[in-house]
Amino acid sequence: ASENHRVLAVAYAQAGMYDDAEASFEEAMALSVRSVYAVAGLGYLYALRGQKREAEGTLAELQTRAQTEYVSPVALVTVHVALGNIDDALTWLRRAHEERRGWMAYLKVEPLLDPLRANMEFTKLLQAMQLN
């Protein structure tokens, strides 16, 4: 159930429906004890809203949690892309590729990654995955 709220929240955020997105992210976190993906999604939303400090706070939380539990590189890509940290996003995207994260199958079509599409390193990753 929390995954449904998180996916809905991302869709709301991408549609510019930020209040609805925030409510869905909060519901996802309430149902999942702050899953890393819900935290990353909230960071994504904060960055889209221009709340850089809050978005960076979610990154800090994810990095702290990574010291004691697994944090998917996909979660870190999500926040870095929204903050415009292209180099960091690409670093974590390469890590996700190395870990063979299933989410990578959507690399070519995931709207969240649109800010990376003009980047040559992103294009090379698409080619390496034979998704070009």
Image (spheres, rainbow, N blue to C red):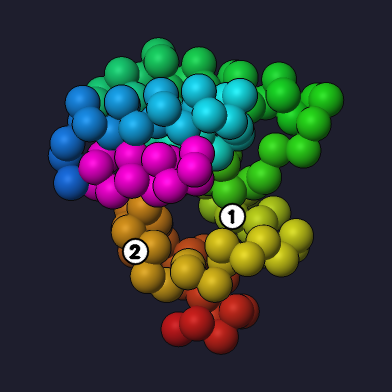
Observer-nearest residue: 12 or 2?
2
Q: Secondary structure at mark 2?
A: loop
Residue 31: x and y in percent read 53, 29
Is residue 39 in view?
Answer: no
**Closer to the camera: disc 2 or disc 1?**
1
Q: Residue furthest front?
A: 1
User: Where residue 69 appears, x then y in whole percent?
Assistant: 80, 31
> Is residue 122 at least partly visible in the picture?
yes
The amino acid pointed to by label 1 is Leu
**Structural crowding at the residue carrying mark 1, measured as other residues with C-alpha within 10 Å and reported as few (<14), some (14–19) or many (≥20):** many
Distance CA(mark 2)–CA(mark 1) = 15 Å
Residue 24 as seen in the image, left or right of residue 13: right
Q: Position of residue 11 (x, y in %)?
A: 28, 48
Q: Quadrant of the C terminus?
A: bottom left
Q: Is residue 48 left or right of residue 126?
A: left
Q: Residue 8 lies in magenta, yes or no? A: yes
Q: Residue at x 46, y 32 (%)?
A: 28
Rendered residue at 59%/55% (across/down): 93
The magenta-colored residue range is 1-14
The residue shown at (52%, 64%) is 121
Name the quadrant containing residue 36: top right
Q: Quadrant of residue 26?
A: top left
Q: Is residue 125 above or below residue 128?
A: above
Q: Quadrant of residue 21?
A: top left
Label 1: which residue?
93
Residue beneath label 2, please?
118
User: Furthest-right residue in view?
Assistant: 68
Is residue 77 located in the magenta-colored stretch of the structure?
Answer: no
The residue type indicated by label 2 comes to Ala
